[in-house]
Amino acid sequence: MYNLVTYPNPILKQRCEPFDFEKPQVDLDLLLTDKKRVLEDEEGFGLAAPQVGVALRIFLINGATTNQYNDKKQFEPMVFINPTVTPVRDMKVVLPEGCLSFPAGDGSVDVERPLFVKVEAFDRHGKSFTIDCSDGFQQILDDEFVDESNRIILSRVIQHENDHLDGVTLLDRVKGISKEMFKRKLRKYRS
Ligand SMILES: [Zn+2]
C-alpha cells in the first residue's frame, strides 16, 4: 500500500521517470487507487507520485478543482500522466501554497508563478488531452459553468504538482525571508 511521504524524504528531490504504458513500472490501478485515498484523506488539491514514494511522472488533482474538465466522472480526481506544462500569457502572480509533504501546521507560503499554464498529458488509459487554463478567460462572465477562481487554482495546482515530478519542492520555490520562516516552521513541527 502506498502512503504519504513527507519532507525530508530524498525521493521528493528526485527527478521522476516517465510512466511506460507499454511496460508499466508499477500497477497503475493500485497506485491511482492509493493516491486517490491519500488525496481525499488529506483533503489536498493535488498529489504527485513521488509523494507516495513512486518516482514516476504522474499526478492527481482533486475532483472539485478539475470538475469542469472531467464531466463524465463527477468529482473524481483527474489523472495526469507524463504531463508537459507550459506557461501561457506573460502574467505572474503571487499566491499562497501548501503541500501535503510539508505538514507544518498552517504551512502555506507565498509563491510567485505564471498565472496560467497549458498542460498536455495522458489519462489512465493512455489517451492524450490538453487543458489550457486561460481558455475562455475573457468570456468567463458569459459562462455559468466556468468559475474564474477555479481556473486560477487549477493552473496553480498543475504547476505545483509538475514541480514534484522534477524533484522541485515548495521549499525550493520560497524566497528570502519567507524561506527562513518556512524552514523554522518545519523544524519546529518536526522536533
Ligand atoms: Zn506538494
Image (spheres, rainbow, N blue to C red):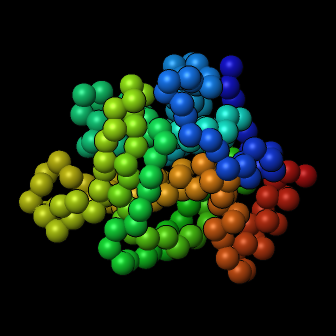
| Residue 15 as seen in the image, left or right of residue 119 | right
Image x and y of residue 185, in percent: 78, 62
The answer to whether any part of residue 36 appears in the image is yes
Of the pair 14 and 37, the residue shown nearer to us: 14
Of the pair 24 and 171, the residue shown nearer to us: 24
Residue that appears at 49% across and 27% down: 21
Residue that appears at 79% across and 65% down: 183
Residue that appears at 27% across and 42% down: 69
Query: Which residue of the protein is positioned furthest toward the left in this rendering?
Result: 142
Query: Which residue of the protein is positioned furthest toward the bottom in this rendering?
Result: 176
Image x and y of residue 48, in percent: 58, 42
The answer to whether any part of residue 41 appears in the image is no
Of the pair 185 and 175, the residue shown nearer to us: 175
User: Is 136 above or below relative to 59?
Assistant: below
Instruction: Please identify the quarter of the rendering in which residue 51 is found.
Output: top right
Image x and y of residue 132, in percent: 29, 56
User: Is 115 above or below relative to 82?
Assistant: below
Image x and y of residue 54, in percent: 67, 34
Residue that appears at 12% across and 55% down: 143
Counting labels gives 0
Of the pair 12 and 25, the residue shown nearer to us: 25
| Residue 13 as seen in the image, left or right of residue 95 | right
Image quarter where the N terminus lies is: top right
